[in-house]
Image (cartoon, helix red, strand yellow):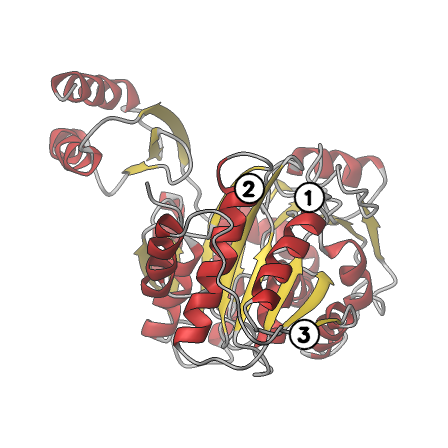
Amino acid sequence: MRIFGNDGFRSRFGDKYMTIGFLSAFANAVSNYLLKNKFDAPVLIGRDTRQSGIIIEKLITAIINYTGINTESAGIIPTPGLSSILQDGKYSLGIMITASHDPAQNNGIKLFGASGLKLDEVTEQGMENDIKQIPPFSIPQFKIIGNHHNDEKLGKKYANKTGQLFQQLDMPYKILVDCSNGAYSDIAKLALKDYKTIQFIHDKPNGNNINLNCGALEPENLLQEVRKNGFDYGVAFDGDGDRAVFVSNKYGLIETEKLIVLFSQILCDEKASNTVVSAEICNKGLEKNCEKLSLDLIQTKVGDRNVVNCVLEKNAIMGAEPSGHYFFPKLSKTMDGLLALFHFIKILKIHGNNLTDKLKALHHYNRIKKDLPAINNSNLVIKHLYEQTNSVIDTEKEKLIIRNSMWDPVLRIYYDYKSKNNFNKIDRLITETLKNHT
């Protein structure tokens, strides 16, 4: 069983990865890694607003301290905030306790290296092997005990640092920010305190209302509030703040792929590169828009670490995932919803009242999504599925992506088309192929 996915691990609190036994084995594996590699700087730990995060932080901290390693707690902080603080160079590792956009009853772990980048897969695999071999509560004794320090000013430090990256812009547009009752509920207000036309909702977390009928997975609710209360635009973060979904009073839900293009045009003026990176499940329209605007588009496997690594390797101007994750390599080491909002404000400064027309002029294809039950030898089967469907796909006008879900036992199908919908034919071919492999 694989533990670490593309972005850590998560499950319902009290089950699977979120039991006392598993978390004790995980914390011990972290200690083993640090001691083996002779890291002597503290481990930085942060969490989102879930009630269970308090228990998880105390348990992990106690075990790491028990093995002689120092820890420091940032308290409630967004995932990009933890990454930003790590870049100061005072820590050996970062542990973010969050289940991102999941409901409050779930929780999870994301790991970061000392540089602020997500921990590499090789290191995670080593920890995974340790976790599987360590019996629960089998923690060796050490002669010294690590110290623990709380510094809840770190969130404020991140907010000020991010706000100072951008010269305040005259921005007459009214923006409504949905904090998802998550980690940005206080920190976003600090970073945006000089923008008097920005207001906030779902900014009162109680430990159980994170992502509850709000946030990045519920942008339609935000759009309704924007239109009802006379705002021009809105942005919804997810629980840990690495995602941002934008809406417009006049346009509606703004597609991530279109914002990638607008962000890239701004960034092209600041850097020679014209390369953009996106996860492969991006809409076909992004390919067409990049071709039209002479942007080189690279598509990676799904997973923000895959996007980030490709951006850095190819010296790209930015990277993104269609779910609303944006990566700006000159300013951050991970996806950052707050940075996306500041870049959106720059777009408003440049395009102003013409933004709706700009968005309408960009391509976006129709999309059909379908989930099918996962099967054995799925990688081989996916290869056969592509072979069977290639003959009916016009790659100029259509796009088909078939992939395994990381967290759910399903195959995910994404089909984009411009005008002629061939999905029924494709669906029949996929169904027949799957029958032959069961």
Give me the disc on residue 147: 3
Position of 293 relative to 70 (above/below): above
Position of 74 relative to 8 (above/below): below
- Mark toward the start of the polypeptide (1 vs 2): 2
Assess whether mark 2 and mark 1 are in contact (beta carbons under 8 angstroms).
yes
- Mark toward the start of the polypeptide (3 vs 2): 2
Q: Which residue is mark 1?
A: 52
Q: Residue at x 47, y 63 (%)?
A: 30
Q: Residue at x 42, y 68 (%)?
A: 33
What amino acid is found at the position of numbered circle 2 in the picture? Met
How far apart are labels 1 and 2 at the CA level? 9 Å
In x, y percent, where is residue 247?
66, 45
Q: Which residue is mark 2?
A: 18
How far apart are labels 3 and 1 at the CA level? 23 Å
Question: Is 211 situated left or right of 283 in this image?
Answer: right
Q: Residue at x 32, y 51 (%)?
A: 301
